[in-house]
């Protein structure tokens, strides 16, 4: 058993485990079950134009049966959603170490400025003359992201990371087509996110798996063997999903470029690089960013995101329409005349509300803050690695960047798996790490603390992980049946999938 | 930096414990020639007050206080205050996709309620947890129909939002999925049924229409469905204006509905984030893209909710997934759920009727002016209408702007055959006075 002076022992005692002491949560029925006819939470102003005869106007296209929406008063709605909210874990409550998800602090000024009237109420088709303010915001964000990535051009249109991948691979395809051959396959390392192969398939490419080397990185020999004249691109996550920087990155780019293939970078792990290294400098041709990861826009329980795609100049003609341009007089407008464009990937211009938040984050940081953020993210991951490597197996010894991946090898030998350890972590007041991913690590525990964790929170997390390692040895059932402190225990996912109940229905 | 919770001494302590000489030693794995040896060229670090000043100035430069007749896929409706109060609770705002069901029951139950409301409104059996927006949702719906039918052609109405059609073309391009465009009846603005019937073949996977369509006209969904189904094709109905469902008959004959739910309490925000959603008949569930929340029980029999049927999704199926979608629009879907709870069963109808009344008044008032003609008057419409003016829109729109009114969207860029036609929208937020002023200014004195 490892102990050292700097790591606090887990306080235990009646009703306390680590930083957790249970408190009440309230039961709350479905909103439909709380409804009673005649309750109201709205009041429309009096109609200042003549009322219309709906039946006469709409005829057969009139709705004759109302949708079964709930009827409640305002206080009940506030309580309903507030009670539901108390059933969630959140960054605002504590560390959320999901690997590759970059669950960092979501600054509140971002929310404030995104709601400023002139920005929040701007219609996408308002004349450019009435949209110069938002166009300047978009322009400044574009310039900042181009500088941060070291690329030459950018589109903010994609709505999320996977949508950015789609856009980026379309650029790759359009460029190859302009060279006379779209090519057939995309190489994807076996450590990649599932969105990478799914994206390649949607873009009409076959996926060829690239096996990782003993360090979990790109195997240069395998790459040399597999890259041929039909290879469109390699989709590479760098740092990789095991949190390791591809130190041979320039050779990887050279091997691809020698055969006319391009290097696509999945920017999911950009939080390890901002202000320290730029993909454009190390050979990347096209990449996407996740504003909801690296640039602090909130995950919101699953979205919205934003997935800008940055590229080198030779790919610029293919960017989705429209692109933002500046007139000689400094006024900005959208240019739709882009004959080589891959087309639109989304209506309007993208998730503009997320652009505002991301820019607010960049302004709050400045160059020094962005660099310090990256350094702290890497420092936190390495600190966790150092403190947990005696208790958990480290399958790859390569230096970690912003995340560290352990395996459950030692615990699995005692019958306890990564998923069980993750569930037990909940009892200690933490959101689980990413479970069983990347797939190149059997029984992976993928931990990304981000820069947002204090030393105190990190030490509590480390103490919890160590305590669980002891529990696995001494009381494995306690871990295998966790969590024990939540509103609901483990849920029956098998029945949920076999007999799907996906909506409420009124009682017969 | 104010977001970073560490003192310089703590950083030194941590480095010492790691056994690293300096922070830069942790970055030595990056080849030296690729390490950035300078500051990024971005604006200097700013105080919170400076950030607010910057965005306020941008907001003012954008201009505020204009009455607006803009719609065309982005609609200005009143947003009840409690929407922002509730979605800004950190437990909703700062949580991740609810993979860990035990500590995300709040998000999961809210999504289950969203799925129920969308299914109720659209007349479909099931709805998913959201898509990026109406345009990508429509494209994904077409690809879904291809998987269901095993056919590889689409028939698309020209009255589907032009930008939705562009997005669909981008998605379809590399899937070997050609589509045929179907025009509209120049009297009614509805899909040309004869042309539609002629275009649908045994190879058609899906017919995609929008209702109310891009001109605001409500399509004859039963007739279109009959034509599609006669040849074994699926009918996909795209709905860009969700509030219409308060008074407009839901497209129950459709097989798949792709809806943009922005009208349900989501700010215009210059076009995003919005909230797409796909709903469908139960038998097509396994080909649905995106996340789904299902009801189940825990080990003690207590009701709970989980993400389900994930074997459709990219993190399990990789290149064989139904879609590459991962992040969706969860928080925006929560806004829509709260909006629909506030208005409820009666309110959504009353709200839709107010929209209908305002648009009816506006269409009459504006088209009563000389040199102004209301097009497509032969079919029912919701809250948008098309005007054709003798004078070029460039001229009268400037007169309206001088009165702080933004007139309709010019249609010529998408429908050159319509000449000077413009698309106008009147929601509950436009006042009679604004309509009357617009009518007065529209025609030069």
Image (spheres, coloured by chain):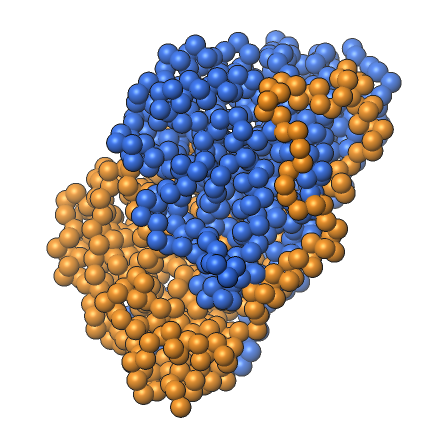
Up-down: is A189 above or below B305? above
Chain drawn in blue: A
Q: Residue placed at 87% from the left, 18% from the top?
A: A5
The image quadrant that residue B335 belongs to is bottom right
> Which is nearer the eye, A47 or A39?
A47
- Tell me: A120 left or right of B367: right
Q: Residue placed at 67% from the left, 14% from the top?
A: A392
Quadrant of the drawing holding the N terminus of chain B: top right
Q: Residue placed at 64% from the left, 62% from the top?
A: B57
Q: Residue furthest bottom?
A: B445
- Tell me: B294 left or right of A370: left
Residue B429 in percent (x, y) is at 51, 74
Q: Residue furthest right?
A: A5
The image quadrant that residue B227 belongs to is bottom left
Chain drawn in orange: B
Q: Residue placed at 48% from the left, 55% from the top?
A: A326
């Amino acid at each position: 058993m490892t102990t050292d002076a700097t790591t606090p022992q887990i306080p235990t005692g009646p009703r306390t485990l680590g930083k957790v002491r249970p408190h009440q949560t309230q039961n709350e029925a479905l909103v439909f079950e709380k409804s009673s006819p005649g309750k109201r939470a709205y009041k429309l102003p009096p109609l200042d134009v003549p009322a219309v005869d709906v039946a006469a106007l709409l005829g057969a296209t009139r709705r004759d049966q109302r949708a079964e929406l709930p009827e409640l008063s305002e206080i009940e709605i506030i309580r309903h959603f507030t009670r539901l909210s108390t059933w969630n874990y959140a960054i605002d409550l504590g560390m959320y170490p999901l690997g590759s998800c970059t669950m960092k602090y979501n600054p509140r000024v971002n929310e404030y400025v995104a709601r400023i009237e002139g920005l929040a109420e701007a219609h996408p088709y308002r004349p450019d003359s009435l949209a110069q303010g938002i166009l300047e915001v978009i322009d400044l964000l574009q310039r900042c992201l181009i500088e941060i990535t070291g690329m030459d051009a950018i589109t903010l249109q994609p709505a999320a990371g996977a949508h950015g991948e789609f856009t980026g691979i379309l650029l790759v395809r359009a460029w190859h087509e302009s060279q006379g051959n779209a090519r057939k396959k995309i190489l994807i390392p076996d450590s990649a996110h599932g969105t990478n192969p799914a994206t390649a398939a949607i873009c009409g490419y076959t996926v060829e798996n690239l096996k990782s080397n003993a360090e979990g990185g790109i195997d240069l020999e395998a790459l040399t063997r597999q890259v041929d004249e039909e290879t469109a691109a390699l989709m590479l996550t760098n740092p990789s999903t095991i949190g390791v920087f591809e130190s041979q990155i320039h050779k990887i780019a050279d091997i691809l470029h020698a055969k006319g293939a391009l290097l696509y970078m999945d920017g999911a792990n950009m939080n390890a690089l901002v202000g320290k290294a730029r993909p454009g400098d190390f050979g990347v041709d096209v990449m996407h960013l996740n504003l909801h990861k690296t640039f602090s826009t909130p995950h919101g329980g699953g979205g919205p995101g934003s997935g800008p795609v940055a590229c080198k100049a030779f790919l610029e003609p293919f960017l989705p329409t429209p692109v933002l341009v500046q007139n000689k007089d400094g006024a900005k407008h959208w240019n739709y005349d882009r004959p080589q464009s891959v087309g639109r990937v989304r209506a309007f211009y993208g998730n503009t509300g997320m652009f505002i938040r991301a820019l607010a984050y960049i302004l709050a940081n400045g160059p020094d803050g962005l660099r310090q953020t990256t350094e702290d993210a890497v420092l936190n991951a390495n600190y966790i690695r150092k403190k947990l490597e005696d208790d958990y197996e480290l399958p790859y010894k390569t230096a970690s960047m912003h995340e560290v991946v352990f395996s459950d090898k030692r615990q699995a030998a005692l019958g306890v798996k990564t998923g069980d350890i993750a569930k037990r972590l909940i009892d200690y007041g933490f959101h689980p790490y990413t479970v069983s991913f990347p797939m190149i690590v059997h029984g992976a525990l993928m931990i990304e603390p981000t820069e947002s964790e204090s030393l105190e929170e990190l030490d509590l997390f480390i103490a919890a992980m160590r305590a669980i390692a002891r529990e696995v040895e001494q009381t494995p059932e306690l871990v295998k049946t966790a969590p024990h402190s939540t509103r609901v225990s483990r849920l029956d996912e098998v029945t949920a999938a076999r007999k799907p109940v996906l909506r409420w229905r009124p009682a017969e | 930096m104010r977001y970073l919770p560490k003192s310089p001494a703590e950083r030194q302590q941590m480095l010492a414990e790691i056994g690293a000489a300096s922070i830069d030693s942790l970055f030595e794995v990056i080849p030296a020639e690729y390490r950035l040896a300078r500051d990024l060229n971005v604006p200097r670090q700013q105080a919170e007050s400076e950030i607010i000043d910057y965005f306020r100035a941008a907001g003012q430069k954008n201009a505020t206080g204009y009455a607006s007749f803009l719609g065309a896929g982005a609609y200005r409706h009143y947003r009840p205050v409690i929407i922002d109060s509730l979605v800004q609770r950190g437990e909703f705002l700062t949580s991740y996709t609810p993979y860990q069901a035990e500590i995300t029951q709040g998000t999961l139950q809210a999504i289950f309620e969203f799925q129920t409301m969308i299914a109720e409104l659209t007349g479909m059996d099931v709805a998913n947890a959201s898509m990026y927006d109406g345009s990508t949702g429509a494209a994904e719906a077409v690809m879904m129909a291809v998987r269901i039918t095993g056919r590889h052609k689409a028939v698309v109405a020209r009255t589907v939002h032009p930008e939705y059609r562009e997005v669909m073309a981008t998605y379809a391009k590399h899937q070997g999925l050609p589509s045929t465009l179907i025009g509209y009846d120049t009297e009614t603005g509805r899909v040309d049924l004869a042309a539609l019937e002629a275009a649908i073949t045994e190879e058609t996977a899906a017919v995609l229409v929008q209702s109310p369509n891009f001109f605001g006209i409500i399509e004859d969904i039963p007739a279109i469905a009959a034509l599609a189904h006669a040849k074994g094709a699926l009918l996909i109905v795209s709905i860009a204006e969700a509030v219409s469902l308060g008074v407009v008959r839901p497209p129950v004959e459709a097989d798949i509905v792709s809806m943009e739910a922005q009208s349900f309490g989501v700010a215009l925000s210059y076009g995003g984030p919005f909230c797409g959603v796909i709903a469908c008949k139960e038998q097509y569930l396994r080909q649905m893209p995106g996340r789904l929340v299902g009801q189940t029980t825990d080990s003690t029999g207590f009701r709970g909710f989980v993400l389900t049927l994930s074997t459709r999704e990219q993190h399990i199926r990789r290149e064989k997934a139904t879609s590459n979608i991962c992040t969706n629009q969860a928080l925006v879907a929560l806004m829509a759920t709260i909006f629909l709870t506030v208005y409820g069963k009666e309110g959504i109808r009353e709200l839709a009727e107010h929209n209908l009344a305002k648009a009816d008044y506006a269409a009459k008032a504006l088209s009563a002016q000389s040199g102004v003609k209301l097009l497509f008057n032969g079919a029912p419409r919701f809250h948008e209408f098309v005007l054709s003016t003798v004078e070029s829109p460039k001229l009268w729109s400037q007169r309206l702007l001088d009165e702080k009114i933004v007139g309709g969207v010019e249609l010529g860029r998408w429908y050159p055959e319509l000449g000077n036609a413009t698309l106008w929208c009147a929601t509950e937020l436009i006042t009679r006075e604004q309509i009357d002023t617009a009518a007065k200014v529209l025609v030069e004195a």
